Image (cartoon, rainbow, N blue to C red):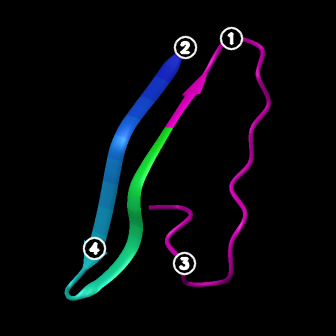
Amino acid sequence: MIQVDALTKTFGRFTAVNQLSFKAEKGDVLGFLGPNGAGKST
């Protein structure tokens, strides 16, 4: 299991991720969708 609570990532004054929270249980399949440069791999 992995759990993320209120994750925020900024680059200078640009906020790429704001207050992201999620929980993934064993066996769950998840994906992140967003435009290029949005910070998905961060």
Q: Which mark is residue 26?
A: 1
Q: Nearer the viewer, residue 32 or 21?
A: 21
The magenta-colored residue range is 22-42
Quadrant of residue 24 in the image?
top right
Tell me whether the residue at label 2 lies in contact with that at label 1, contact meaning CB atoms closer than 8 angstroms.
yes
The kind of residue on which mark 4 rests is Thr
Q: Residues within 10 Å of mark 1 (few under 14, many from 20)?
A: few
Going from N to C along the chain, the mark reached first, 3 or 2, is 2
Going from N to C along the chain, the mark reached first, 3 or 4, is 4
Measured from the top left, where is residue 33 in percent x and y? Answer: 73, 63
From the image, tell me which residue sits under label 2. Answer: 1
Gap between marks 4 and 2 measured at Cα = 26 Å
From the image, tell me which residue sits under label 3. Answer: 38
State left or right for residue 12 relative to residue 36. left
Measured from the top left, where is residue 40 in percent x and y? Answer: 56, 64
* Callout 2: SS: loop
